[in-house]
Amino acid sequence: MSEETRSETYAELASVGPYGVRPGHALITMVEPHPGHEYAYNRWYEDDHYYAGAMAMPWMYAGRRWVATRELQELRGPEKSAVARPVTAGCYLSTYWITEGRYDDHMKWTVGINKRLNRDARVHQERTHVFTSFQDHEATVYRDGAAGPRDFHALDHPYAGLILQVVDTEGPEERAALLERLRTRELPRRLAGSPTAMVTIFRPTPLPGDRMTYVKQVEGVDTRLTLLWFLERDPRECWTEHYADLDTVGAGGDGAGGGDGGGGGRVELVAPFIPTVPGTDRYVDQLR
């Protein structure tokens, strides 16, 4: 006899609420496996948690894992980061899109399923969450206008790299000014002629009070922006030419020497990654 799944409620739930494809929300999680547990962590995440703890959930419709080899970790900045201590911490990054308007629905499921996974000993404990937060989508800036993949394609399109950038501001008004400056001036200028196809911009949302205890509460809910730069080239091949000064983007007056606007912030992390190869342990031996 099959287990009770209350399947009669699924049709009812599917008939109500938003069901577009826009990535209204994201889960962005950067994790450091404890030394000596890198292979075990990678296999647990790929073989079980990526699916049971993420992709199988309602309204989480796209995902991709990324990895920072030691070579990529050493490109990070700033040295004293408010996000990663030390700045090299967090060699795996997972990014997920959630259907716009479905954050609350998804959270009810994810809290429940993660409690169940933890209870059933299906959670790998030898890891540290360096930067984990659900985030609301604010804007996407495209290099090529209407041509090319959209942001809802970004986690399925075979991009060669990703850069995680975190910028802090003094308050909500400063963040709004920074967002406007990035969206309308600074990012379009930076993307032109570069290997970056798009940049998605998010702001963090607080985690629920009944979250799992190993995930700390989100910082910077009113002051922080998170940028994901999607690259068509391996960041190691083009870092010096295009990204070595990324710590100026979002900082100061205009981040490009122009000084033509307010809304400056403090860049607290610039971290490049390359995609993992699902079903393999490629790059695990290059983390330390």
Image (spheres, rainbow, N blue to C red):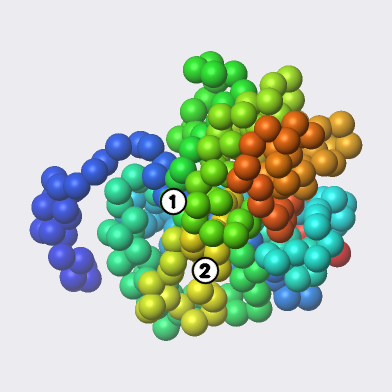
Q: Quadrant of the N terminus?
A: bottom left
Say which of 266 and 58 sits in front. 266
Identify the residue shown where x is 73% and y is 75%. Answer: 34
SS type, badge 2: loop
* x and y percentages locating residue 65 in the rendered image: 61, 51
Amino acid under label 2?
A: Val
The answer to which quarter of the image holds residue 244 is: top right
Q: Is residue 100 visible?
A: yes
* x and y percentages locating residue 257 in the rendered image: 79, 34
* x and y percentages locating residue 261 in the rendered image: 64, 37
| Residue assigned mark 1 | 136
| Residue assigned mark 2 | 218
Amino acid under label 1?
A: Asp
How much space separates mark 1 and mark 2, taking CA atoms? 13 Å
State which tag comes first along the sequence, 1 or 2: 1
* x and y percentages locating residue 22 in the rendered image: 38, 37
Identify the residue shown where x is 80% and y is 66%. Answer: 80
